[in-house]
Amino acid sequence: MLPDPRETVLVRLARAIRQRCADHKGDASMQETLVQVRGLSKQFKRDNGETFFAVKDVTLEIRRGEIFSLLGPNGAGKTTTISMISGLLTPTQGDALIGGNSITKNPLAAKKMLGVVPQEIALYPTLSARQNLQFFGKMHGLGGKELDRAVDEVLDLIDLGDRDRDKVDNFSGGMKRRVNIGIGMLHKPQLIYMDEPTVGIDPQNRRRILDTVLRLRDELKMTVLYTSHLMEEVQEISDRVGIIDHGQMIALGTVGELIQKVGEEDRLIFKVGEQPVAEALLRRIESEAATATRARYERREIANSDAGALATAEGILTVYATRGRKALPDIIRLADESSLDILSVEVREPDLEAVFLHLTGRALRD
Amino acid sequence: MQRILDIALNDLRIIFKDRSIWINLVILPIVISVAVGYANGAGFTGGGTVSLRVDGFDADASAMSAQFLDAVRAGNANLVLCPMDQTEADLCQLGDEALTAELAQTRLEDKVSLATLEIPSGFGAALARGEAVSVIYRSNEDATAPSYILQAVQSAATRLSGAQIAVQVGGQVADSLSFLQFSDDADRAAFLEEIRGRAAAGWAADLITVETVQAALDPATTQTSGGGFAQSIPGIASMYVMFTVLPAASAFILERKNWTLQRLATLPISRAQILGGKLLARFVMGMIQYAVLFGFGALALGVTFGSQPLTMLPVMIAYTACVTALALALTTFITTDMQAQGITLFMSLTLAPLGGAWWPLEIVPEWMRVIGHVSPIAWAMDAYREIIFYGGGIGDVIVPIAVLLAATAALFAIGVARFRFSK
């Protein structure tokens, strides 16, 4: 069976992340705190009059020069958190300090240090890319030649120099995203918030955006607060990650630190179709397969899209092992001895998906 | 202030990028103003004065009857006596037809003419003999209302009667003076004609005149105020200011949907600057709307706006500010673009007629006039009418301006307190 192509990517990413963490440990500026969030909460009222907390008691610190990501499923409270930190929403409780300036008490000073890239394409569609950049640049206090220079630099950075006079309305989704990001970095802020900047775009543009984010940190020395529900991109670019779920911060640390929480085990995922897996086989795998620690079986119903057709089931055998590749031959042998046909296998090295699963009991995409 | 101007200029640029704005800003308001102006009685001769058409029958065709008709014309410059004053442009609307009694009756019923005047045969001879004579005046006018035409006819009759009395008295006095001898009847007739001429000149000199203070102060004003257009231009302009400014509510909703409003809220600019810029753009649009229609009225229709037209500027500013504040307040109560469009249309089409934009509030019952003043248009129209029709100055329009500014303050307070960048 061919290995999952993602496996090699993940291995490469994990190596790069570990290397980056090691590199940054010696950087003194990385230790300086730029953003302090203390007990931030936001309460909303539903249509029926009930109140609920979209964000509850979130506390975190973002260090100067790092990419800090908020990871969580849709509706977890990432955008609400970022909206409060950027001054768009007033917190019900708590506060955020940006460079020592309170976003609630001294918002203009705090906002001067910020560049915000909202999840939505917040552009004037009938204006050109250049006109959009010029307008928002003026709002940041830029003017004259300084504004022209900043606009040209950003157009160059987002690779839209040749389309600068075209109406934004005529751009592709990816190009609009790039203008959206460009506006956030126009005034060279110390801190830039990016709320799910890769939502709804093709892989090529997504790659461009992730590269741009890395350049912001590595070349322009900006601090980035990044939110996403996509584990892979968070894992690739982040120095530290906060995992948020149901409005609460449930874990915070470097990718390595978070992975340590789940014991740094590989996951081997076997699809077995509708075949049942006996309890005896699970015990044999745990005791006989090299480095295996746990094995479990779950059966998922799969709804059939054909009207009137019966639902089918998919059996998943998951084995946790400290060295997945070493355990794999033993597991295949034991399955063969129990007459269990393995339809596919996937080896997953420890990742944030596993962390989220470990902490919440459900997958990030559920 | 610079940020406010930048936001306003950006909004204006976006508004004017849509070329259809010219339809709503220029073409439609002009067309409607002209139509409503005619409906309000704008003259058939154009945008300026009103023509009062009167059909006349001069069965006497004497020098005396001609003198009488001249005196009638002198009584009101807007009178057109038909067919005597017929022009190539068919001012009498007779075409090639000869005026007959039947035709005159039909024209009167159809309100093509406002009155008929018949001078009987023997009119001049009877007057020369000092006998009483009648001219017949027919009209569909309200008997209780003062008639400009009837006043002119009566004035002419009074003048001619006065001159004739002077002739009779002069003749009697001359006959009683023994030292005054006429060589023959022709000499006597010439003497009497001399008296008539002097009496007529005396009448023309208007030794006693009545100066009307309220109704028509300045002859220049009353001659050129423009009748129906003087009503329709400020009325329709005020209505279209609503059409232009109230869509600020839609614009706010659209910006919220596009997230540009939220993005502005994350920038180092204050809430007051953002709202100020957005509302300034709409305010400017309202003032442009006023400039378009008043400019058209003055240049194309020949309407003049009172003896102190600059007094209208503070009225325009106060009214446009009020509508801008209304737009902000509305924004805080509506959540969708459909709601915004519906409310904008409803408010404009309700407040405009209620406030006297389509017709003068003077013609509606008293209770409707009171209700009408819930509309800011009513206060603005009160001020415009005072300036345009009565030659009012700033002191005469202080109350409407104060009411509009008070409403502006109240609506702004509601709008600012309730406004949220995100819903």
Image: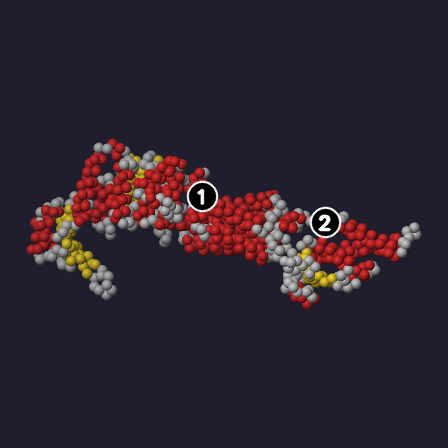
Of B422 and B41, nearer the camera is B41
- Position of residue A258 relative to residue B138, above or below, is above
Q: Which residue is mark 1?
A: B8
Specify which label sits upstream in the sequence, 2 or 1. Answer: 1
Residue at 19% across, 61% down: A312
Of B134 and B331, nearer the camera is B134
Residue at 58% across, 49% down: B298
The reply, left or right, for residue B69 in relation to residue A318 is right
Residue at 11% across, 47% down: A325
- Going by the picture, which residue comes out furthest to the top? A28
The reply, left or right, for residue A271 in relation to residue B140 is left
Q: Can you give x and y, in whole percent of width and height, for residue B375 in the image? A: 53, 52
Q: Can you give x and y, in whole percent of width and height, for residue B392 in the image? A: 62, 46
Q: Secondary structure at mark 2?
A: loop
Residue type (three-letter) at the residue carrying disc 2 = Val
Coloring scheme used = secondary structure
Q: Secondary structure at mark 1?
A: helix
Q: Which label number is shown at residue B210?
A: 2
Q: Can you give x and y, in whole percent of width and height, for residue B90 in the image? A: 64, 59
The reply, left or right, for residue A168 in relation to residue B111 is left
